[in-house]
Image (spheres, rainbow, N blue to C red):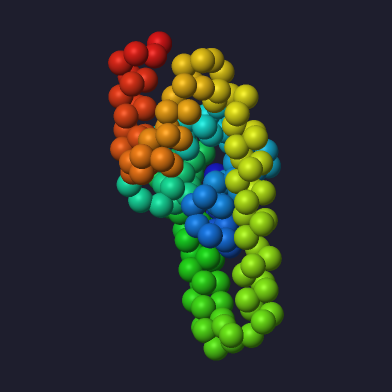
Amino acid sequence: MKLLKLLQLFIAFGRVGVLGYGGGPSSIPLVQIEVVENYKWLTIDEFSQVLAIGNALPGPIATKMAGYIGYKVAGLPGAFMAVLGMIGPSLFVMLLLYNIMSVFKDLPQIKGMIKAIKPVVIILLGLLIWDMIPNSLTNYTAIAIAALSLVLIQFLKIHPAIVVVMALAYGGFFIR
């Protein structure tokens, strides 16, 4: 049973690592699909909490999530397999594709492929947001925090990590 869990972790995060074109933001919806919908290792609320904590820490979000979720599912071996699944196949594919694309980068087909994938990433992010809204914007305080975060990040150009830390501090002191 434990070996099956380890294999499932490797496969689930391997899919995310290979298909998460564009890094963390495009990988997060794929992690959610694997972890919440396919394998049911976390609920959407638990996933939202892991995402929030992961965003508060430095480093690649999807890899941190893989490590935590792998650990929750199967301990240290699970964390190892999830992270290996996340970075191993994608590193191999990246090196392979980079070598191919660097040779053919000026071909219209390659340029078209890159342009075509961007709208898919946007939809994946939009669907993730859509799924998280009912569990995240549950009251006026949450809506105010979201609006203030938008202003701070987008218009005042405050680094997102600072805004995340500010929200954590506010929640720790004032939200019960």
Q: Is residue 154 left or right of residue 123?
A: left
**Measured from the top left, where is residue 6 in percent x and y?**
54, 50
Q: Nearer the viewer, residue 87 or 6?
A: 87
**Measured from the top left, where is residue 71 in percent x and y?**
44, 41
Check the picture and name the quadrant holding the C terminus: top left
- Residue drawn at (32%, 47%) of the image: 58
Q: Is residue 118 left or right of residue 165?
A: right
Q: Nearer the viewer, residue 35 or 109?
A: 109
Check the picture and name the quadrant holding the N terminus: top right
Q: Quadrant of residue 16?
A: bottom right
Q: Is residue 156 left or right of residue 63?
A: left
Residue 35 lies, with reference to residue 80, above or below; the image says above
- Residue drawn at (50%, 57%) of the image: 23
- Residue drawn at (61%, 40%) of the image: 128
Residue 78 in sight here: no
Residue 97 in sight here: yes
**Measured from the top left, where is residue 154 in percent x and y?**
43, 42
Residue pushed farthest bottom? 103
